[in-house]
Every structure is written in structure tokens, then in C-alpha cells.
Amino acid sequence: MIQDDLRTTARLAHLDLSETELSAALGDFERMLGYFAAMRAADTDEAAFGGPLEELSLSAKDNPAGNSLRDDNTAPSRLSETLLASSPEREGRYLVVPNVL
């Protein structure tokens, strides 16, 4: 993948990436495309993965960036009450909005 292809893909996906971000992401996208090509070929050719499938490591623990998921922590919030209080019209716990169709 060349940088112009990545720029076009980012634009189509409505991603506003700077030139620095595009350059940094290019290698990652090329690796992903390589994985996709290997998966496509795996139906008929195990060697497409570059070795035995058991040795292929694609888990988050093997990623140098680590696991990018965050813990799912809950916290009490009064946001819904605040929104309801500022609404001009409501029915119980629901906001009433005008029909737009």
C-alpha cells in the first residue's frame, strides 16, 4: 500500500489524519493487508502464512503497543436528571422532541 492509497482510504472512512499520522500508520496497514491476504489464501495454502499456523502470533499480548482496551468501570451519574431538567418538554423519563418527518 502506498501513502496515497492510505490517504484515500482514510478520507473515505472520514478519518482526519495528518501526514505524520499517515506515515506512522502505513506500516501497520501494510501488515494488516498482509494478514488479510494470508487469510484469503489459507483456504488452500497453509504456507501463505509464512510458517505453521501454530507459530503465528497475533494476540494483543504480543503487540508491542499492548492491549489498548480500558477497564469497564461504572460510576454514578446524574447526567440524565440534568438533561431532563433542561428539556423544554418531557414525558416521565423521556425527552419529547418534534417530529421531523
Image (cartoon, grey):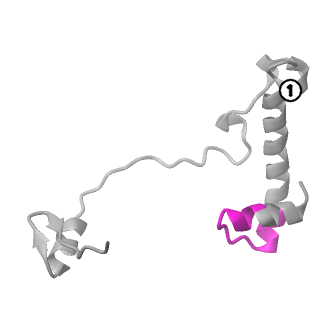
Name the residue rendered at 16%, 65% in the picture. 94
**x 32%, y 72%: residue:** 101
Depth order, front residue of 18/68: 18
Name which residue lies at 10% across and 67% down: 91
Occupied quadrant, residue 31? top right
Measuring from the top left, give residue 79's x and y in whole percent.
24, 68
Looking at the rendering, which quadrant does residue 11 occupy?
bottom right
Mark 1: amino acid: Phe
Residue 43's place in the image compared with 4, above or below, is: above
**Label 1, residues with CA under 10 Å away: few <14, some 14-19, many ≥20:** some
Q: For residue 97, which quarter of the picture?
A: bottom left
Q: Residue furthest left?
A: 92
- Left or right: 28 as drawn, with respect to 85: right
Q: Position of residue 13 (x, y in %)?
A: 66, 62
Q: Write the start and end of the magenta stretch as one range.
A: 9-23
Task: Identify the secondary structure beneath mark 1.
Answer: helix
Residue 61, relative to residue 73: is it above or below?
above
Image coordinates for residue 18, horizontal then vertical, percent: 76, 74
In the drawing, does residue 75 fall left or right of residue 2?
Answer: left
Where is residue 17 shown, x and y percent of the image? 72, 70
Dominant SS type (magenta)? helix
Q: Is residue 6 located in the magenta-colored stretch of the structure?
A: no
- Residue occupying image coordinates x 85% and y 48%: 30
Q: Quadrant of the N terminus?
A: bottom right
Would you say residue 18 sits in the magenta stretch? yes
Residue at numbered disc 1: 49
